[in-house]
Image (cartoon, rainbow, N blue to C red):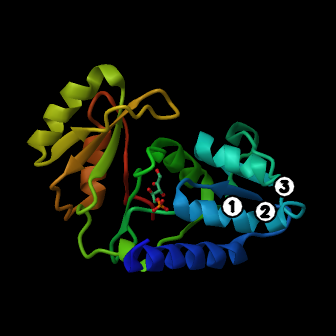
């Protein structure tokens, strides 16, 4: 492992450990997806008897939660949840995020929206001044892949199909390269409105 990946890993562990203090006894915790969240789930295992359960953002996290002895709850049966903990691929100074490197962006957005508080756990290497160095993931209905890709080119990006990846919702991912995202909320709205788009990995509209 290189020095930078070792320090990124240490940053992920530290961020995940810090998020544990936001978990309240007898509460339901929203859980994101990814390698940083994996450390959070490891920590959450020590609280398993003290929390009601978790709402998961992916099949991957559901499996990890169950393996840790934590009940995975249906969001429809929960109503608003107090806390959502998740990682990100990029974060700007206004805490606007790019997410979806793990292809779980749609369920992540749903669980985040259902939560009163979103605690984002990132290592320092994820901080950027302007979003867009990390290719922006967009989940699309398969039949709309080319249509949406052409629209994304008109918006100035270079979409690349994440070939071979099928999301937990049965859809596909376009990763949009070469964007310099100076208006994240505006671009989030614009891409969300394209027919065929299920969701975009910009998390910029949360107040
Ligand atoms: C998954 C995500 C992840 O939160 C994001 O990709 C960060 O992952 P990692 O913690 O492995 O760096 O959005 O869809």
Return the residue nearer the eye: 196 or 86.
86
- Name the secondary structure under disc 2: helix
Q: Earlier in the sequence, mark 2 or mark 3?
A: 2
| Identity of the residue drawn at 54% across and 52% down | 113
Return the residue nearer the eye: 90 or 163.
163
Circle 1/circle 2 CB separation < 8 Å: yes
Residue 137 x/y as whole percent? 33, 47
Q: Is residue 108 above or below residue 141?
A: below
| Identity of the residue drawn at 78% across and 54% down | 68
Q: Earlier in the sequence, mark 3 or mark 1?
A: 1
- Dot 3: few (<14), some (14–19), or many (≥20) neighbours within 10 Å? some
Which circle marks residue 52 in the picture?
A: 3
Residue 65 x/y as whole percent? 72, 51
Asked if residue 94 shows in the view, the reply is no
Q: Residue furthest right?
A: 49
Residue 104 x/y as whole percent? 48, 45
Circle 2/circle 3 CB separation < 8 Å: no
Which circle marks residue 41 in the picture?
A: 1
Which circle marks residue 45 in the picture?
A: 2
Q: How many marks?
A: 3
| Identity of the residue drawn at 71% across and 77% down | 21
On the picture, is 34 further left or further right than 162? right
- Name the secondary structure under disc 3: loop
Q: Residue furthest front?
A: 1
The residue at label 3 has a CB less than 8 Å from ligand 1:
no
- Dot 2: few (<14), some (14–19), or many (≥20) neighbours within 10 Å? some
Between the residue at mark 2 and the residue at mark 3, the CA separation in whole angstroms equals 12 Å
Q: Residue furthest top?
A: 143
């Amino acid at each position: 492992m290189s020095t930078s990946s070792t320090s990124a890993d240490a940053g992920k562990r530290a961020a995940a450990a810090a998020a544990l203090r936001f978990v309240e006894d007898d509460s339901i915790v929203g859980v994101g997806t990814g390698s940083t969240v994996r450390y959070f789930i490891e920590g959450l295992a020590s609280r398993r008897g003290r929390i009601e359960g978790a709402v998961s953002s992916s099949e991957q996290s559901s499996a990890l939660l169950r393996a840790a002895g934590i009940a995975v709850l249906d969001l429809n049966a929960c109503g608003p949840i107090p806390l959502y903990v998740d990682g990100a691929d990029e974060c700007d100074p206004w805490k606007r995020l790019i997410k979806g490197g793990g292809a779980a962006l749609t369920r992540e957005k749903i669980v985040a929206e259902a939560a009163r508080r979103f605690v984002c756990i990132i290592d320092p290497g994820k901080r950027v001044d302007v979003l867009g160095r990390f290719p922006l993931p967009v989940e699309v209905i398969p039949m709309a892949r080319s249509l949406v890709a052409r629209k994304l080119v008109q918006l100035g990006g270079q979409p690349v199909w994440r070939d071979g990846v099928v999301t937990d919702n049965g859809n596909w991912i376009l990763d949009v390269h070469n964007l310099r995202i100076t208006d994240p909320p505006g671009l989030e709205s614009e891409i969300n409105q394209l027919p065929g788009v299920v969701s975009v990995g910009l998390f910029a509209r949360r107040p």
